[in-house]
Image (cartoon, rainbow, N blue to C red):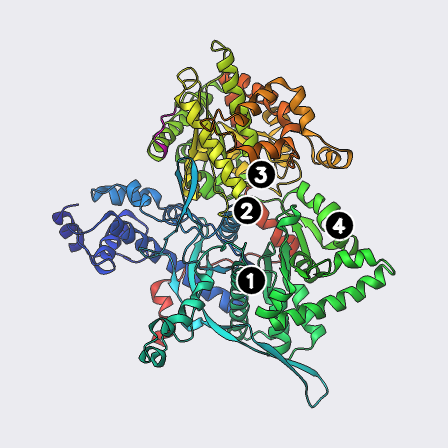
Amino acid sequence: MSNNEITTERSEQPEDNRTGLNKGALRRAFLDNLYYVQGKFPTLATKHDYYMALAYTVRDRLLQRWISTAEEYTRQGSRTVTYFSAEFLLGPHLGNNLINLGIQDEARQAIRELGLSFEELLGQEVEPGLGNGGLGRLAACYLDSMATLEIPSIGYGIRYEFGIFSQHIVEGWQVEQTDKWLLKGNPWEISRPEWGVEIKLGGHTEHWVDNSGCKKARWVAGRTVLGIPYDTPILGYRNNTANTLRLWRAEAPESFDLGVFNRGDYYGAVQKKVVSENISKILYPNDEQIQGKELRLEQQFFFVSCSLQDMLRILRVQNIPLERFHEKFAVQLNDTHPAIAIAELMRLLVDENGMEWNTAWSVTQQSFGYTNHTLLPEALERWPVALMSRILPRHMEIIFEINAHFLDEVRMRFPGEDAILARLSLIDESGERYVRMANLASVASHAINGVAELHSELLKQDVLTDFHALWPEKFTNVTNGVTPRRWIALSNPRLTKLLCHTIGEDWIKNLQELRRIEPLCDDASFQREWRFIKRSVKEDFARHARRATGISIDPESMFDVQVKRIHEYKRQHLNVLHVVALYHRIKTNPNIDIQPRTFIFGGKAAPGYHFAKLMIKLINSVGDVVNRDPIVRDRLKVIFLPNYSVTNGQRVYPAADLSEQISTAGKEASGTGNMKFSMNGALTIGTLDGANVEIREEVGAENFFLFGLTAEEVQATWKNGYDPRDIYQNNNELRAVIDLIQNGHFSRGDRDLFRPIVDSLLYGDPYRLLADYQSYVDCQHQVSEAYREPERWTRMSILNVARMGKFSSDRSIDKYCREIWKVTPVKIGLLTQKQMNGDWRQ
């Protein structure tokens, strides 16, 4: 960008510099922000400076909509959804906001005319890794859909200073490095210190009876921290709604103790600051040690207490009586991480505001909804009573009181049924006493939902069966969805252009419109264009893979992709067994005809999950051998995509030919990656697990590659006995595959390295890999045969996209609004700058 260009641009009289959406207004605003926000001119400006200037240019347009939205909500006192989630995995903001504003082309042209690369500027944004995976990404999709559907909402969570770790692969092993997403600043957020709140921790409680004979309680804190809100606008698609994501940062009430410093204790002078700020320091600290458990509980309480106090502030601003809290707010608990909010709301209502217990309990029950995200018993959150009593003494008392009232109700319903009482109790009394957070959430919520039809049925039959027997009317299903704005329009612009050219743009906001391409599934011209787009996207991904891994992959090969959190129940090691089986077939018969495949893995293992880390090592070790073998490498390639994230997801979903959704039936609540793959034209190989069931129903059984045991058949193996060694002994290929791993073929002769994986498979196989092995490899053969027929494969791919309308997060949010939240849309009129300044001028 030359100084002459800048001089010419700056000499023009700006028209609506802050809010204009045309190319000229964007150029002028970009240059203003480069000068007056970044303080740079082109000779000194870096790519990051240019990115920041563009981000602030876009943010100005968001703020006009944000202020307009806040003004309308405040004026109307609109009923508002407050979405409580410990994770929000948003992904990069800039591209998504440009899509939602409808100015992506204008911004690209403005930047290119200044001699800059639009794509390079987008690539400068550091992704805020404020989540582990599906839970946080779902929350982000739901915020997008609530804004798009014009639903008043606030997302509440934690502004982690360090998000999920950055993953590097060193000699095949996962190595975690600190995620420093805030290092160069975050242009999308605005700090609101004036709305900070005080949070208590530790200490003790005091009890007394007042003059009217009422029992009273007071929490005397051992220490306090401040919660400071940071707000990010969440823009709807091509409307004027901009809702709020409000994340809380922990600060010390006093950052520096001058007296301690003057006595020479320099560390002690800042110790309170360090201890306080630890609360929002890192996403999910390792909780294997008691200190980690304490910090996680403190984190959960910190953000829900901040959020509830903020909601009470909003009631005061809007002059809404406290007794109408549940009429103003619908509070959704995204799993059990925020469930301590139930006890905290009771404390705020009863202790701090003098509300009578039964009234407060009625308000609380009418306020909360609970979304369950897991069928794994070990994933149902529990806290030791001793730990909670030490950190949250008043809340422990409130939970005991809730439990006492609840168990009285259970006794009336099930007299003499002590076993049911023990299962339903909020306190697990077997051994060390624990608070069962799922039980607390179930008791205190007016609605309980699963996230796929199968998951919701299994909740009723197993995990929450006693609660379903008690309150069947509370239970419902809301199948997860994903936003088509990010997962098609932004991540797959080539496909988006074809779809818009063919059926118009309405599908971006109404995904059911994709049905209109279904009649074209056999059209030769449309098929050719479809294949050309897929090939182009795969070429782009191959270049990225080369940069990320150093491995060259062939876009002509089938891209067989499994990207998700690394976990035994997701069964990445079943996928590896298939890779080794193909490798073994080629080594045994070099002339065998095998469809070339590139196996693409990606995902992070929790830092303390050693088995999952070993699975990553196995993937990379198998890949190292396969990729170097001259007999095999032109037909098979294996890559592990490091640091899987939203950004990398946007690259890999459009490039995939085959989507691996191979979890043990009955273990995955829903999954959303399966939806993103299908929306972008990948075909699915999967079990009848989670949302796979509904995807198969929608796209048609003939367009889905099904294998494996059903959830009922998996359960039967536990009841009737299961010996994986019998399968190993009686399946020659499987035995050869496991023996190759066991004998050190992929570990340079080290027979001990992968022994934990082999022993797990042969002496227990808790996730039934061997039971599903033959069905899986037979189904993979069907996949290969289908891929050999381009017209057939393309037809299936087109029909997958055409029939994915159900899996938009817009549909999910619409159902929440109608059946659980009872919230209606609010239209936002866009205020001009003059109108926004009106109150001040008066």
For the residues labelled 2 and 4, the Cα–Cα distance comes to 29 Å
Say what amino acid the circle numbered 2 marks.
Asp
- Sequence-wise first label, 1 or 2: 1
Which residue of the protein is positioned furthest toward the top in this rendering?
A: 591
Say what amino acid the circle numbered 1 marks.
Leu
Q: Are marks 4 and 3 in contact (CB under 8 Å)?
A: no
Which residue of the protein is positioned furthest toward the bottom in this rendering?
A: 211
Which residue of the protein is positioned furthest toward the left in this rendering?
A: 4
- Sequence-wise first label, 3 or 2: 3
Q: Which mark is residue 465?
A: 4
Numbered disc in front, either 4 or 3: 3
Q: What residue is disc 2 on?
A: 810
Q: What residue is disc 1 on?
A: 297
The answer to whether residue 20 is visible is no
The residue tagged with tag 2: helix, strand or loop? helix
For the residues labelled 1 and 2, the Cα–Cα distance comes to 32 Å
The residue tagged with tag 4: helix, strand or loop? helix
Q: What residue is disc 3 on?
A: 568
The magenta region covers 549-553
**Magenta includes 552?**
yes
Which of the pair 445/813 is nearer the observer? 445
